[in-house]
Amino acid sequence: MTIIDPTDAVPAQRPGDHDNTGPLLEVRDLHVEFQTREGVVKAVNGVNYTVDSGETLAVLGESGSGKSVTAQAIMGILDMPPARIPQGEIRFYGQDMLTMGAEERRKLRGARIAMIFQDALSSLNPVLSVGFQLGEMFRVHQGMSRKQAKAKSIELMDRVKIPAAAARVNDYPHQFSGGMRQRIMIAMALALEPDLIIADEPTTALDVTVQAQVMDLLAELQREYRMGLILITHDLGVVADVADKIAVMYAGRIVETAPVHELYKRPAHPYTRGLLDSIPRLDQKGQELYAIQGLPPNLLKVPQGCAFNPRCDKAQDICRTEFPPLVPVTEADGTELPGRASACHFWKETIHG
Amino acid sequence: MGRYVARRLLQVIPVVIGVTFIIFCLVFALPGDPIQALAGDKRADPNIAAILRAHYHLNEPLYQQYWHYISGVVTGDLGETYNGRAISDIVSERFPVTLKLGLTSFALEAVIGIIAGIFSALKKGKFIDNVVLVSTLVLISIPVFVLGSVLQLEFGVNLKITPVAGIEHGWPQSYILPAVVLASTSMAYIARLVRTSMMESVRADYVRTAIAKGLPTRRVIGVHAMRNSLIPVVTFLGFDLGALMGGAIITERVFNMPGIGGQLAQSVYLRERPVVVGLVTLLVLIYLVANLLVDLLYAVLDPRIRYE
Amino acid sequence: MSEKTIERPTTDEAAIAKEIEAEEKAAARQASLLRDGWADLRKRPLFIVTSLIILILLALAIAPSLFTARSPFSDGFCQLQNSMTGPSSGHLFGYDVQGCDIYTRTVYGARNSVVVGVVTTTATTLIGGLVGMLAGLIGGWADALLSRITEVFAGLPLIIGGLLIMSIWGGGDVWSVSFIMAILGWPQVYRIMRGEVIANKYNDYVTAARALGAGSWRIAFRHILPNTLAPVIVITTMNLGVYISAEAALSYLGIGIQYPNISWGVMISDAQDRFLTSPHALMFPAGALSITVLAFIMLGDVVRDAFDPKMR
């Protein structure tokens, strides 16, 4: 009599597997709107980005730039009224998730695309034990029994380096420290070894030293499982170590993309340059700190032309009238710079001085 | 958890002492001489009066009377009426009626209230939600005695479905209409509370996480949202159970039911001090015990409280 | 320390000043939850309807003679031969068991109900609010002591406590009833206010105010208090209805407002015995009572919807 152990030999067919063509994730011309009392808020206005297995994309932007909404659209967790997706595609291995049925999409969620949220204290259910919440993933998606799920939960907690996992599996979220809670969130996301993880400001609520530990853990797990990682943040410091490429968002659009080191060395958009200049530096001691003047735009009334123009010190007339498309960025002599693009009329001046 | 329980228990004691003392003082501040009142219009025989006064400790200072009383209560002796009848007898006679009424009422309000609230929250904005909202508002506003009288007229007299008053038909016939009336206000509050509570939970971050984990909607609502949203409801139910015991006064009067509430109203009217003190003390103690149990239950349901 | 070099790639100072001013104005407009709530409230149709009903009630209470020519205190107001006659022209609500015109009595009864409701609510809010704020601010042993005392008061449920106290001290007029209910009711407001104060006390804006040198009283009244008001306002509005209903219940039991004062509760109680044969004597005051309580509770609902930040 053969005993089939459900923990090994995971079926080759995973939910969502069809003819797998195309990159892991491709977002094409995504638009997301919200119907509110005061009008239609255009939160995402034509976003394109791609993520491959093993690759880390950092999405940078201020509050209101649309970075979180895009991520939630990818996950499919937006409240559909009042949110609407009037156009765009979100392709997972070539298949457009926006045209999938709700049940099919649900099977992908958590199992193949997982999300880590910013505030682990409010994102974990306070009245259910940590073991229960971790075990759910296995019980619901893989039909495991309670005992098996618990064993896997302890394994997971060990994997994310939570000490004394076996003893703490029945504890409640409020009994853990901030860093530990975030690790639990990471463990929950990892449970079913998803292809893609979206981390929405995973370290914003943590101390600096704990931030470093959590980011290291994420990077290590990503390498081990060959996952795609979308890291959403507004903190340039966090990104430098972990990301492969960066997309900078403003007013619901991508205004610049670049491989990580290129962005820091030679930004090609005034907004990016402004963000970089705002980072306090040791050699600026005694001087006044720089900040980009003005506030993020009201998404009910996005400025005409380039959305950034009211705050840009290099704005010209054309910036106020003509919308700058995202164009590839090249060297001064025209050599291609792969992965680089900018949505600025004057990108040449910005990058090359 | 043990420390929390111990602390709660300790906190209850001074409150119990305080409340009973106040009740005692209030009742014994009643003007007039109860022994004389017993005798009615005739002049009481001084010898007999003296014996009676000594028997009821009426000559002793207030705090000593209180002490006699409290030591009696603790041992289950609630004292005697001025006619020599043990109040605990009155209680054991009448309490079952109040208990049956209260429990039936409790069951009705819990079941109907929670179900109505859940439907209302899940179908927010639709017809059933508005029906629940309007009807709960109306139920809260119409006073219990009005609702009681009207329903008594309709169902008891006109339609002859339920008995008009009294308890001759036993449970459930005699109790069903009074229980509905008694439950009406609380039912409305519970439905609203469940509705608000669920609406809040459904918007919580941890529900967003549950959805992001790919859990089916049934589980997200049934397990994640419900566990949290039922906490305030359960605590309300706990308080209400205690209040139901005493709040039946009005309903008992409308439907002429021989319960504790009816006895209390009558004794107040007749100025029967010992009975009033005894009954009020009993009801207040029940209420305080219910509060205590609710606090403890709350700790069981919400693990964050246990470790305070 | 090297000289300050201002390296701002931005434009002239005037523009900056204007921008700051504009931002402050915008912030001030958004600032107050109370202001927001009030603006929201004014737009809601339910608010307008309930306010109208309440205004009519207030008119009834202040100037009953506007609504009825007769006075229930005049001689010959009650004529026994009219006992239990139903509604007719000139006597819209009919007569009660003593032959008194129900319409007039209902109109005059409004005054007592409204006064009791308003006085009790004001008293409970003021007492509960003040003591709650003190307990929340001072904390420590004062808080523990006040809370224990409050629990003792709270241990007496409204009806039972009212029954007890009123039976001892009689009374039977609006002021004693209001007084008794206020004594039994203030713990509720106390709990809410105290909870809000404690929740707000540790907020950063309080620390900031203190760091800027504000004294304790200023912090309490200017900073903490406005932020605690929303739930208190909601509960106060609802309590208007609750206390009117409670007074009616006590009067119905014979221990609230008593003869010769008029109360809807007493009218209902008097009409109860003949209810099964002549319902009009009970239905009209009951209707008036229900509409009144409904109006206040709906008002409380609407106010809560407008002021609750979570519902926006």
Image (cartoon, rainbow, N blue to C red):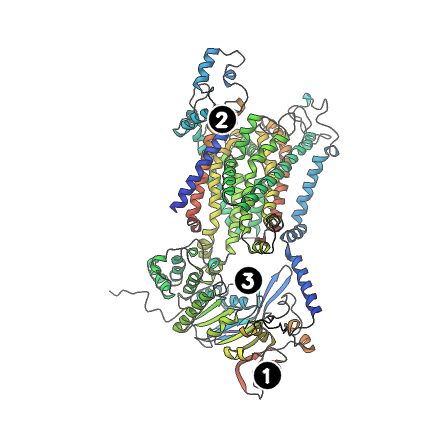
User: Do discs 2 and 1 share a chain?
Assistant: no
Mark 1 surroundings within 10 Å by alpha-carbon count, few (fewer than 14), some (14 through 19), many (20 or more): few
What separation in Å lies between label 2 and label 1 (alpha carbons)?
A: 93 Å
| Between marks 2 and 3 in the image, the one whose residue lies nearer the viewer | 2
**Residue that badge 3 annotates:** A80
What separation in Å lies between label 2 and label 3 (alpha carbons)?
A: 60 Å
Q: Residue at x 27, y 64 (%)?
A: A3
Mark 2 surroundings within 10 Å by alpha-carbon count, few (fewer than 14), some (14 through 19), many (20 or more): many
- Element carrying mark 3: loop
- Disc 1 sits on a residue from what chain? A
Residue B298 shows in the view: yes
Residue C202's label in the rendered image is: none
Residue A242: % across, % down: 46, 73
Quarter of the figure with residue A70? bottom right
- Disc 3 sits on a residue from what chain? A
Q: Residue at x 65, y 47 (%)?
A: C46
- Element carrying mark 1: helix
Residue C270: % across, % down: 61, 26
**Residue that badge 2 annotates:** B276
**Residue that badge 1 annotates:** A352
- Element carrying mark 2: helix
